[in-house]
């Protein structure tokens, strides 16, 4: 069976959520995510997707979040990253909208004005550079796109279009720049300029961009969506946003299912969301988030016979 893997956005805690889900799939479903036929990554998911394609083992994503020793193979890969990371010095910024021309385009064509895209255009450019992300990911990949390439999503500020780096003819773009662009949260990170065009986080278009797989020759899609919500009555500061993003993910799932694809969603339970907190960029929660995500994903897999019996 041909399988697509979709890893959505979610900041630092989103990366920890992916770690728990990937490790649970490896253990309970006996599926190595590195074998996915297509891997789509958005924002934090772009980092995870690229790491998988380079060869980091799914179980080692969890071990790394828990600060446990990695397998020798994954340790050698991670050791390539000598710089970058989460030290994000601020730069000079301003309070003008990041893309006034795009705002004017939305005003002329309101039907194209999705909330995330409008926010990306209206917010001022972020003051936090992404060079550290670009450097560390380039080092991990040794300056070359892995083969097969991850699909890395970013929003182009010129016209509000979603661009999928790693697909079609975009492999000439440096892999580190593509991942950095996908991670450039509007209003927080500075846009990334690639071939004269500015890009921001692909999550401005969609929390996970799963719909890019609708025309692909795959039979099943596994989605890890850290910014959505799976179930439960939890109410907190982030709950309204999570519920909006869950509806967005559900619409994409409906599109995929209408195309005849099986879809398996991993989204935070109320316990996962409580561990993640309202600020996805807040460090210090990674171990707890990865652990709760791992446990909830194990429960999800054990409860769904299709996940345990699907022929990978």
Image (tube, helix red, strand yellow):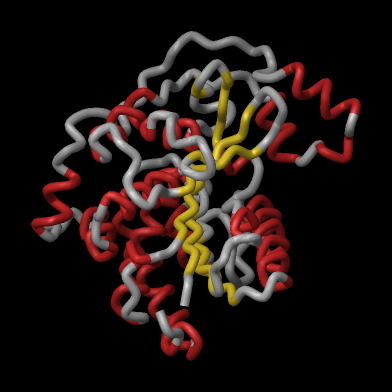
Q: As drawn, which residue projects farthest toward the left?
A: 72
For the question of whether residue 269 can be seen, the reply is: no
Which quadrant of the structure image shows residue 102? Answer: top right
State the image quarter where residue 235 is shown: bottom right
Relative to 205, say whether 288 is above or below: below
Say which quadrant the C terminus sits in. Answer: bottom left
> How many numbered marks are there?
0
Q: Please identify the quarter of the rendering in which residue 29 is found.
A: bottom left
Q: Position of residue 241 (x, y in %)?
A: 66, 50
Q: Residue at x 29, y 77 (%)?
A: 27
Left or right: 38, with 210 as reference point: left
Q: Percent position (x, y) of residue 22? A: 36, 65
Percent x, y of residue 251 = 72, 62
* Residue 47 left/right relative to 280: left
- The residue at the point 44 percent across, 45 percent down is 46
- Do we see residue 261 in this rendering? yes
Instruction: Depth check: give the residue in front, 68 or 121.
Output: 121
Please report the residue visible at 43 percent of the width from the left and 63 percent of the height from the top: 37
- Left or right, residue 59 beside residue 253: left
Q: Residue at x 64, y 39 (%)?
A: 162
Q: Position of residue 58 (x, y in %)?
A: 29, 63
For this rendering, which residue is in front, 294 or 51? 51
């Amino acid at each position: 069976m041909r399988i697509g893997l979709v890893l959505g956005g979610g900041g630092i805690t989103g990366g920890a959520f992916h770690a728990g889900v990937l490790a649970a799939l490896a253990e309970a479903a006996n599926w190595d995510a590195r074998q996915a036929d297509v891997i789509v990554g958005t924002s934090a998911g772009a980092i995870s997707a690229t790491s998988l394609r380079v060869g980091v083992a799914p179980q080692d994503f969890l071990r790394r979040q828990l600060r446990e020793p990695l397998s020798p193979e994954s340790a050698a890969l991670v050791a390539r990253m000598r710089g970058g990371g989460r030290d994000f010095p601020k730069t000079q910024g301003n309070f003008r909208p990041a893309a006034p021309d795009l705002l004017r385009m939305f005003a002329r064509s309101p039907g194209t004005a999705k909330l995330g895209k409008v926010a990306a255009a209206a917010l001022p450019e972020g003051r936090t550079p992404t060079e550290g992300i670009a450097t560390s990911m380039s080092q991990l990949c040794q300056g070359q796109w892995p083969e097969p390439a991850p699909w890395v999503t970013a929003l182009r500020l010129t016209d509000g279009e979603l661009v999928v780096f790693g697909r079609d003819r975009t492999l000439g773009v440096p892999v580190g720049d593509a991942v950095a662009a996908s991670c450039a949260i509007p209003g927080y990170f500075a846009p990334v300029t690639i071939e004269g065009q500015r890009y921001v986080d692909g999550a401005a278009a969609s929390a996970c961009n799963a719909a890019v797989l609708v025309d692909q020759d795959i039979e099943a899609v596994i989605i890890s969506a850290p910014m959505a919500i799976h179930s439960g009555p939890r109410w907190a500061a982030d709950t309204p946003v999570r519920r909006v993003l869950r509806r967005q993910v559900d619409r994409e799932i409906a599109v995929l299912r209408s195309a005849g694809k099986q879809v398996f969603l991993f989204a935070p339970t109320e316990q996962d969301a409580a561990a993640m907190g309202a600020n996805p960029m807040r460090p210090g929660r990674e171990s707890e988030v990865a652990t709760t995500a791992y446990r909830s994903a194990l429960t999800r897999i054990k409860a769904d016979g299709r996940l345990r019996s699907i022929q990978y």
